[in-house]
Amino acid sequence: DWAEHHQQHGPGSMEVGLSYHLLVFCFLGLSAQLYFAVGPPAHRSMAFDDSIRAVDLRDFHAGICACYERPCICLWSCCCPLIRLTDTMWTMGFVRNFWLSYLTLLVSSYLFGPLTWLIVCIYGAACRQQLRQKFEMHRQGEETCFEDCCLHCFCHWCTIVQEARQVDAAVRSGHPAVAQRPPVLRDPGV
């Protein structure tokens, strides 16, 4: 229990541990960004794919359980979901500063502890609603708010993969909804 921990390790040891973990996650995020920004030529640009039409993106391009079809996106979503979610939102132009948004989510996960899951689910659902609006999807608005919240709450990683694949498809097709910038985390399998 907490009192025993304090007696054995002294005051501040938990804070040092949390600070250490925060620094490790920041380092991993920065390393990932640098790798994909200056990585091999296959990562520098996404191939344009004119077989994907804007109409195809009026519904989600991939199924919610189709994570395995793009292993790189799936891996990022499972191992670094905050980076992948922030990248998707940055590519769509929903956030102006990738690193500020990522660090805000990361720090809030340490400050709010168990409430973090709820915060990230609500944030994810709000961003998913913005995706629906930007792509002018057939299903959007009030009828999908609860669905999006449940998806981010109970199937968070699969939902992040689905959204990332939607945005990647929009980038490859030159869809007008995408901000004029390539994603931070490019999938070499494109």
Image (spheres, rainbow, N blue to C red):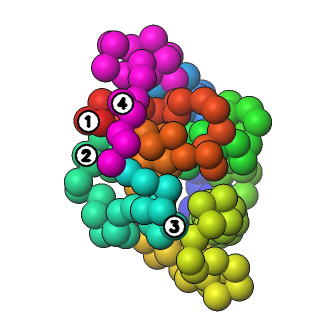
N-terminal of the pair, mark 2 or mark 1, is 2
Q: Quadrant of residue 46?
A: top left
In contact (CB < 8 Å): disc 2 and disc 1: yes
- Horizontal relation, residue 112 to residue 172: left or right: right
In contact (CB < 8 Å): disc 1 and disc 4: no
Residue that appears at 30% across and 58% down: 67
Distance Cα–Cα, label 3 vs label 2 = 24 Å
Residue 22 appears in the rendering: yes
For the C terminus, the quadrant is top left
Residue 24 appears in the rendering: no
N-terminal of the pair, mark 1 or mark 3, is 3
Label 4 CA crowd tier, 10 Å (few <14, some 14–19, many 20+) = few
Which circle, 1 or 3, is nearer the viewer?
3
Mark 3 sits on what residue? 58
Distance Cα–Cα, label 3 vs label 4 = 21 Å
Q: Which mark is residue 47?
A: 4
- Disc 4 residue type? Ala
In the rendered image of this protein, does residue 104 appear above or below residue 37?
A: below
Q: Which mark is residue 71?
A: 2
In the rendered image, residue 14, in percent from the top left (x then y), is placed at 63, 42
Residue 41 in the magenta stretch? The answer is: yes
Magenta segment: 33-51
Q: Which mark is residue 189?
A: 1
